[in-house]
Image: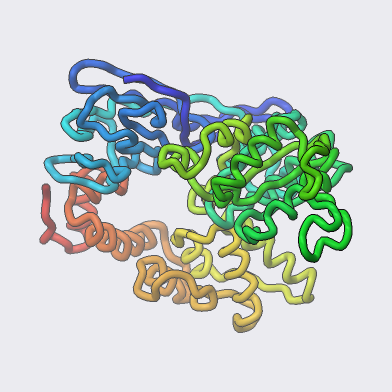
């Protein structure tokens, strides 16, 4: 079993030195094939490690029953999430084929006919920024401050960069921050949005054209590469490029030369730094033949993964309050968050990430009563979801003692987990506690009729 460096999450801070602190995070996994071979590998810049038979996987397992990219492991609260990636022979745990499940140290599972044990989850020291702001970005959470420390190192370099992240995580703001922290900060920052690029106008927009090159070309027009000369070209959603344009992009990036339409022999040299962004898994796109491997390596001299909001913990409330400050500054309307609103926000998955949070807060600020945002003002999730139920239970005007609050959370959340996981063992793994402890908590709530594996 061969391995390559890959990804994980942050935990708690330890020490500081100037503008950089040292933090501890899950940073090593040890897994063992049950034929005796053990692999240990570091995790960096994100939480997912892929396993499979091909070299496209982060960890290569030489077994014909294993698919090319078979499964992934991801560090989460309470353990390591195992996810099957559509493997032909399936991923199995406790005799059942699984799509996604949380593992603890010592758990065994199978990929095809290959049996694997999660031996250990270790920690490493990583550098994080001391400040909660970096350029246009904000974050008090450790995942964001680790990102800031990496940005501070990479932004001043001449390296082309690939920024990955889900929709709404702030890829354009990150690209602008890279530009602003670079030596090109006083030069143009030009955006090419591949998702809105009309195929009929793509070449003319990107590479420019000469007067008379086509009907309607009434004057010479430089393309986006030329417009970004001396500065930064931000290629947003690069994964949307057609196969034909990928070839042309690769040629332009390799040579740093472009030819306008109507001037095939006149190559113009451009001095640009490229920052590309995508919400797709470009490695998977390469494996599936939808994205050129040479172009992928050309734009990914350095890579940054933006954490989704659900991984950022304390940032949810901190960002919400910053957005309310903006509302107050723009409209003179000071609005606060009620405790039940904060509870609901902390339990929401935020599939639209920071963009969803910003829109939810802005809307709620204008529809709430008495300048206080409550859970019902946020329009998040399902009204029957456990987050809503907890938020409403807390909206009773009382100061809850810790033990009462703990029991209230258990009474709403644990049944929801049991319904989803359908067994004590699976629920305990999801919660990161032992089966005995979960049984005790359920018994205290009067839930005795539960199934075990």
85 to 129, vertically: above or below: below
Q: Is residue 164 left or right of residue 226?
A: left
Quadrant of the image occupied by residue 26:
top left
> Is residue 312 among what the camera can see?
no
Picture residue at 49% right of the left edge, 32% below the top? 25
| Residue in front for this viewpoint, 446 or 62 | 62
| Residue in front for this viewpoint, 66 or 262 | 262
Picture coordinates of residue 56, whole percent (x, y): 41, 31
Picture residue at 18% right of the left edge, 50% below the top? 424
351 to 241, vertically: above or below: below
Q: Quadrant of the N terminus?
A: top left
Picture coordinates of residue 287, whole percent (x, y): 42, 37
Q: Is residue 328 left or right of residue 96?
A: right
Q: Residue furthest top?
A: 36
Number of numbered discs on residues: 0
Picture residue at 65% right of the left edge, 41% below the top? 248
257 to 440, vertically: above or below: above
Picture coordinates of residue 72, whole percent (x, y): 35, 38
Picture coordinates of residue 191, whole percent (x, y): 73, 52
| Residue in front for this viewpoint, 106 or 404 | 106
Q: How is the image coloured?
A: rainbow
Q: Is residue 440 left or right of residue 313?
A: left
> Is residue 125 among what the camera can see?
yes
Quadrant of the image occupied by residue 164:
top right
Q: Is residue 138 left or right of residue 408?
A: right
32 to 189, vertically: above or below: above
| Residue in front for this viewpoint, 7 or 297 | 297
Picture residue at 83% right of the left edge, 50% below the top? 222
């Amino acid at each position: 079993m061969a391995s390559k460096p890959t990804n994980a999450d942050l935990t708690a801070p330890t020490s500081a030195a100037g503008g950089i602190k040292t933090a501890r995070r899950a940073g090593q996994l040890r897994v063992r094939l049950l034929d005796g071979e053990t692999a240990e590998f570091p995790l960096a810049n994100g939480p997912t490690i892929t396993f499979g038979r091909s070299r496209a996987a982060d960890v290569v397992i030489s077994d014909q029953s294993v698919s090319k990219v078979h499964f992934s492991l991801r560090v989460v609260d309470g353990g390591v999430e195992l996810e099957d990636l559509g493997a032909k022979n399936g991923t199995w745990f406790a005799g059942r084929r699984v799509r996604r499940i949380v593992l603890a140290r010592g758990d065994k599972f199978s990929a095809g006919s290959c049996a694997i044990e999660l031996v250990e989850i270790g920690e490493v020291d990583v550098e994080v920024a001391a400040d909660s702001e970096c350029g246009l970005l904000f974050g008090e959470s450790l995942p964001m401050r680790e990102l800031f420390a990496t940005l501070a190192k990479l932004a001043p370099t001449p390296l082309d960069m690939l920024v990955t992240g889900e929709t709404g995580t702030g890829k354009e703001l990150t690209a602008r921050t890279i530009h602003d922290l670079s030596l090109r900060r006083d030069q143009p920052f030009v955006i090419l949005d591949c998702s809105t690029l009309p195929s009929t106008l793509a070449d003319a927009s990107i590479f420019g054209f000469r007067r008379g090159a086509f009907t309607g070309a009434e004057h010479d027009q430089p393309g986006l590469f030329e417009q970004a000369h001396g500065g930064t070209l931000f290629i947003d959603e690069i994964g949307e490029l057609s196969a034909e344009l990928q070839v042309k992009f690769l040629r332009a990036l390799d040579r740093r030369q472009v030819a306008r339409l109507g001037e095939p022999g006149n190559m113009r040299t451009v001095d640009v730094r490229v920052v590309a962004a995508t919400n797709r898994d470009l490695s998977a796109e390469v494996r599936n033949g939808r994205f050129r491997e040479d172009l992928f390596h050309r734009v990914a001299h350095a890579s940054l993964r933006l954490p989704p909001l659900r991984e950022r913990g304390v940032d949810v409330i901190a960002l919400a309050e910053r957005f309310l400050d903006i509302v107050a500054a723009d409209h003179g309307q000071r609005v606060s968050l009620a405790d039940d609103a904060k509870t609901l926000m902390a339990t929401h998955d935020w599939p639209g990430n920071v963009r969803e949070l910003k829109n939810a807060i802005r809307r709620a600020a204008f529809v709430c009563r008495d300048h206080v945002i409550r859970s019902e003002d946020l329009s998040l999730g399902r009204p029957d979801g456990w987050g809503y139920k907890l938020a409403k239970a807390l909206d009773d005007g009382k100061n809850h003692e810790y033990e009462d609050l703990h029991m209230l959370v258990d009474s709403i959340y644990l049944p929801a987990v049991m319904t989803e996981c359908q067994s004590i063992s699976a629920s305990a793994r999801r919660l990161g506690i032992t089966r005995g402890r979960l049984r005790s908590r359920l018994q205290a709530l009067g839930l005795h009729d539960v199934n075990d594996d």
